[in-house]
Amino acid sequence: QVQLVESGGGLVQAGGSLRLSCAASGSIFSINSMGWYRQAPGKQRDLVARITSGGITNYADSVKGRFTISRDNAKNTVYLQMNSLKPEDTAVYYCNLENFRASLKFEYWGQGTQVTVSS
């Protein structure tokens, strides 16, 4: 089992910055992927950014150039640095971890942290 604990959400004005953190504990496989998703009211949960255990990243087009995902493998922690925030970035942000072993994938979610960007 894996536990994910998020922190760093809050209220910020447009143009501001926030840094989200997600600490993972439990059974974390050597091959894994950690990421951030977000869900605004009435909308589906969408990928924001992901990073593999090997350091490969991918981003949603809407955040490229503004958000940066990184990880500290020694601490099993993933970060999301969010700059130049816009009101449309307002959502609940969820941390996600995918464990891979052979052909199997095990997926885990954090409880979510609210990010609100005021105009």
Image (cartoon, rainbow, N blue to C red):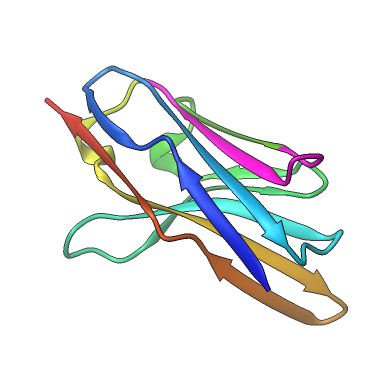
Q: Which residues are magenta?
A: 72-83
Indicate whether residue 54 is drawn in magenta. no
Quadrant in which residue 79 is drawn: top right
Quadrant of the snapshot with the N terminus: bottom right
**Residue nearer the viewer, 113 or 118:** 113
Q: Is residue 105 visible?
A: yes
Across and down, in percent, residue 67 comes to 48, 30
**Residue nearer the viewer, 84 or 97:** 97
Quadrant of the snapshot with the C terminus: top left
Q: Which residue occupies 83% across, 60% down? A: 31
* 52 is higher (above) or lower (below) than 16: below
Instruction: Decide if residue 112 is on the left or right side of residue 28.
Output: left
Q: Which residue occupies 48% across, 25% down? A: 65
The extreme left residue here reads 119
Across and down, in percent, residue 97 comes to 63, 61
Quadrant in which residue 27 is drawn: bottom right
